[in-house]
Image (cartoon, rainbow, N blue to C red):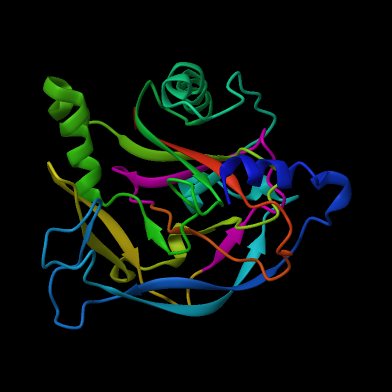
Amino acid sequence: MSTQTTIETQHKFDVTNDIPIPRGEAHSSLTFYKSPEDGATPFNYVETAPEGMPQRNYGEHTREITIQDIRGREHEFDMNVNGFGTVSGIESKEKDFTDDEAIKENYYPEVEKLLLDNVPGSNRVFIFDHTVRRSDPNAKRAPVNRAHIDQTTKSARMRVDYHMGDEAEKLKNERVRLINVWRPLNGPVVASPLAYADSRSVPDEDIVPVEHRYPHRTGETAGVKYTPKGNWYYWSGMKNDERIFLQCYDSKDGARTPHSAFVDPRTKPEWPGRESIEVRALVFG
C-alpha cells in the first residue's frame, strides 16, 4: 500500500467522532532485550551489515505488561524525576512533515524554543537529527516495538564531541541533557501509541549498551531487559498539539527513559496507523 493510499484511507475516518479512542489502562506485550548467546558484545548495524555478519547479534523476548494512562494527570510527571514530561497546546508552522529541509527550517526552531521554555536551567540547544515514522509498509521508518533508549552515557558524551567541536570539553563540564521531543502527526493517536517507563523503576543493571555501527563511526544505544519493577505509561489519544519529552541522558542525575511503541489490543485493523516525528537534541545548562 502506498503512502498516498494510506492517507486516503485514513481520511475516511474522523478520529474524534468516528473512533472511540482507547483510554485508561492498557494490557499489551513489549519486546525486551536478550543478551547474545555467545556472550559477545551486542551490536546492531544501522545500514546493511558487512558480508558474513548478522544485522545484529542479540536476541529479543516479549513479556506481557500493564501500561498506565497519564491522560488527566499529566501534571504528576516531571522529566527530572520520572525521565519524561508533557507539554500541551503547542501549534506548529510545519504541517506536512514530508521534506527534511522544511522540517529543519520550520520545526527545529519551534522545538528549540520549546526546550528552552520548558527545561529549567537550559540556555542552549543543539538539534542533531529527527525521525519521521509512519505505519505504512513503504515508509522509510515505522514505529519501533522494542524497549530501548536512544543513547547511553558514553554515546551522549560522544554526541557532544561530534557536534560541538572546540566547545565540547567545556560544555561537558556543565550540565548536559539529551532529550527527544515526540509528537504525533495524525493525532489523536489510536494505533501504536508510545509507552515509556519511569526512569526510577528500571535498574541500571537492566540497561545494556549496544554498539550502533554506522559506516563511518560507532555509537551506542541501550537495550532494555524486562524487569517486574518497571512502571510503564502512555498518553492516550495523544493530539498533534501535545509533546512528550523523553530524557535519554542527564549528566546531573542520570535519568534515562526506556520507551517503545506498543500494539494496543483495543485498536481495530481499519483504524489509521500512527504517524509521528521525534526530534533529538542536546540541551545545555
Q: Quadrant of residue 42?
A: bottom left
Q: Looking at the image, how many numbered discs can be counted on the residues?
A: 0
- The x and y percentages for residue 260 are 48, 59
- The x and y percentages for residue 185 are 61, 38
Q: Vertical placement of 94 versus 229: above or below?
A: above
The residue nearer to you, when weighing 40 against 176, is: 40
Residue at 46% in and 66% down: 201
Residue at 25% in and 72% down: 58
Q: Quadrant of residue 39?
A: bottom left
Q: Visible in this render: residue 184? A: yes
Q: Is residue 219 left or right of residue 240?
A: left
Q: Vertical placement of 81 versus 278: above or below?
A: below
- The x and y percentages for residue 223 are 32, 64
- The x and y percentages for residue 236 are 70, 54
The magenta-colored residue range is 231-255
The C terminus - image quarter: top left
Q: Is residue 105 left or right of residue 89?
A: left
Q: Is residue 183 left or right of residue 100?
A: right
